Image (spheres, rainbow, N blue to C red):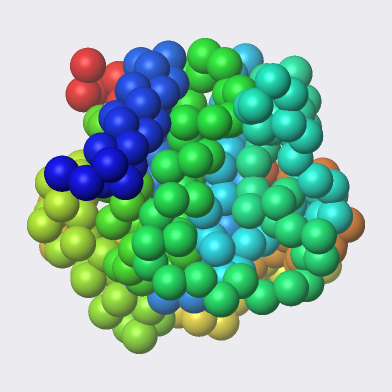
């Protein structure tokens, strides 16, 4: 092996050790996936992280959606760069129990596109696992881009004991892509904790009645057919848009949405306890 090859192998081994040391300090690793874009995956990932942290769990939220990172905006962190102390990247502490890292924290201009090929994206994800000062965590929530490309594959191959949560909307066009995500998880032997159906009906703020704008129940039906747990439904909530645009995570959600989200978190914790 040439000298350059030996040096690269040594560097990879050192990084693998750092990744393994970090993952040993994380009790639960969850990647939030979707078959297609626009289903509210990042919002669901953000809310999972917030609700879990509000219950006293130590949570890390990692955004590996290289081409469309949303987590920084949802938490009001757009434009804030990651600090480096003693060669370690420092996550943003949103609360005492919630730390956040996004690729946007490395960019001089948050609106600049990242034109990266697969190997660069893979290295970035590995660096966020090896060189970030996360500390011990109860949960590592990973917000992955839609589809079954480099990012979710890297997570599946690198993050030991990782489990998936799949987000969908009720329409058939979204559910067809969800089935691909399920097959992806089966192919890489990554357990699926459950499916969440987002944008499932619109609750009228005036009368409280529910209108099924995008239909409802498709995610639950898909989960049943695939023998996968169904974690719950979230309605279309204007408060989600208000909160996201203001960088306030869940502050503007309606009571109904908060109750549904809490039910999803309760079901998630139940599924995790059943596996132990």
Residue 170 visible: no
Point 22% across, 71% down: residue = 180
Point 82% across, 55% down: residue = 78
Point 15% across, 44% down: residue = 1
Q: Which one is in front, 173 or 70?
A: 70
- Quadrant of res 183: bottom left
Callout count:
0
Q: Is residue 187 above or below residue 163?
A: below
Q: Which residue is situated farthest in the bottom direction here?
A: 173
Q: Is residue 126 above or below residue 222?
A: above
Task: List x then y, in percent, for residue 161.
Answer: 25, 31
Whether residue 160 sits left or right of residue 56 in the image: it is: left
- Quadrant of res 270: top left
Whether residue 180 sits left or right of residue 238 in the image: it is: left
Q: Which residue is situated farthest in the right direction here?
A: 246
Task: List x then y, in percent, for residue 70.
Answer: 66, 60
- Quadrant of res 62: top right
């Amino acid at each position: 092996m040439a000298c350059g090859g030996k040096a690269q192998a040594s560097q990879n081994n050192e990084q693998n050790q750092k990744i393994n040391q970090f993952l040993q300090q994380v009790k639960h690793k969850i990647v939030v996936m979707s078959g297609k874009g626009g289903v509210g995956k990042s919002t669901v990932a953000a809310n999972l992280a917030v609700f879990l942290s509000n219950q006293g769990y130590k949570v890390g939220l990692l955004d590996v959606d290289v081409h469309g990172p949303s987590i920084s905006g949802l938490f009001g962190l757009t434009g804030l760069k990651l600090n480096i102390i003693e060669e370690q990247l420092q996550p943003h502490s949103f609360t005492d129990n919630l730390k956040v890292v996004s690729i946007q924290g490395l960019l001089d201009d948050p609106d600049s596109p990242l034109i990266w090929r697969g190997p660069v994206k893979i290295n970035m994800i590995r660096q966020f696992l090896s060189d970030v000062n996360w500390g011990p965590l109860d949960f590592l929530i990973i917000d992955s881009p839609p589809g079954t490309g480099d990012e979710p594959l890297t997570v599946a191959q690198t993050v030991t004991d990782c489990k998936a949560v799949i987000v969908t909307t009720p329409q058939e066009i979204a559910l067809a892509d969800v089935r691909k995500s399920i097959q992806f998880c089966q192919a890489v032997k990554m357990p699926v904790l459950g499916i969440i159906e987002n944008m499932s009906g619109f609750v009228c703020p005036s009368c409280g009645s529910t209108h099924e704008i995008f239909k409802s129940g498709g995610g639950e039906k898909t989960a049943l057919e695939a023998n996968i747990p169904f974690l719950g439904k979230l309605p279309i909530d204007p408060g989600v848009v208000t909160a996201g645009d203001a960088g306030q995570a869940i502050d503007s959600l309606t009571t109904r949405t908060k109750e549904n989200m809490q039910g999803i978190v309760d079901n998630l914790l139940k599924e995790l306890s059943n596996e132990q």
